Amino acid sequence: MEEGELTKKNTSLVLLLLLALVAMFTLQIHMANANGDDNGNPNDLIGDINHDGRVNMEDLSLACLSFFSYPGHSRWNPEADLDNNDLIDLRDIGIVAINFGATH
Ligand SMILES: [Ca+2]
Ligand SMILES: [Ca+2]
């Protein structure tokens, strides 16, 4: 019982750490995008990986499914590479996270 409780606490800690990391990356992206140059279509919703007009769990799952993939990789999804750095990483997940809930 106590061990289970400990594992739960550890999991929460890891989750918190992940969230902190995402927040950090998100802040960087925010600052990087402050100049307003977005290489995508201005009508495109940032973070809307499946282009259904809203940023939600589906987009987050798509980004997660391609996590740590790169061009040529079996799980590579160019749509999920939101910052176009040829790698799906925490920055891309962060971009979905900050735009989460946005709709057209
Ligand atoms: Ca979507
Ligand atoms: Ca990327």
Image: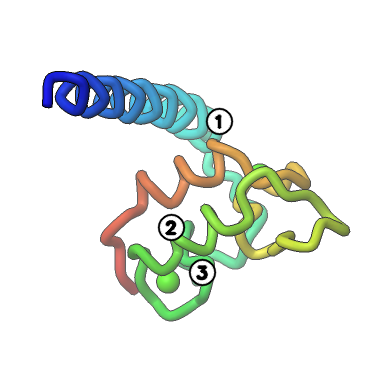
Looking at the image, which residue sits at the far left? 1
Q: Residue 23 location in percent, x, y?
A: 37, 28
Q: Residue 81 location in percent, x, y?
A: 65, 53
In the displayed structure, does residue 94 sit left or right of residue 6?
A: right
- C-alpha span from label 2 to label 1: 21 Å
Residue with the mark numbered 1: 32
Packing grade of label 3 (10 A; few <14, some 14-19, many >=20) is few
Identify which amino acid the numbered label 3 is placed on. Answer: Asp
Q: Quadrant of residue 10?
A: top left
Among numbered discs 3 and 1, the one appearing first in the sequence: 1
Q: SS for tag 3?
A: loop
Q: Is residue 77 above or below residue 98?
A: below
Packing grade of label 1 (10 A; few <14, some 14-19, many >=20) is few
Looking at the image, which residue sits at the far right? 72
Among numbered discs 2 and 1, the one appearing first in the sequence: 1
Among numbered discs 3 and 2, the one appearing first in the sequence: 3
Task: Please report the residue visible at 36 percent of the width from the left and 21 percent of the height from the top.
Answer: 17
In the displayed structure, does residue 11 sit left or right of residue 51?
A: left
Task: Please report the residue visible at 37 percent of the width from the left and 47 percent of the height from the top.
Answer: 97
Q: SS for tag 2?
A: helix
- C-alpha span from label 3 to label 1: 18 Å
Q: Residue 39 location in percent, x, y?
A: 66, 54
Q: Which mark is residue 86?
A: none
Residue with the mark numbered 2: 60
Relative depth, front residue between 54 and 4: 4
Q: SS for tag 1?
A: helix
Q: Which mark is residue 44?
A: 3
- Ligand 2 positioned in quadrant: top right
Q: Is residue 58 above or below residue 82?
A: below
Identify which amino acid the numbered label 1 is placed on. Answer: Ala
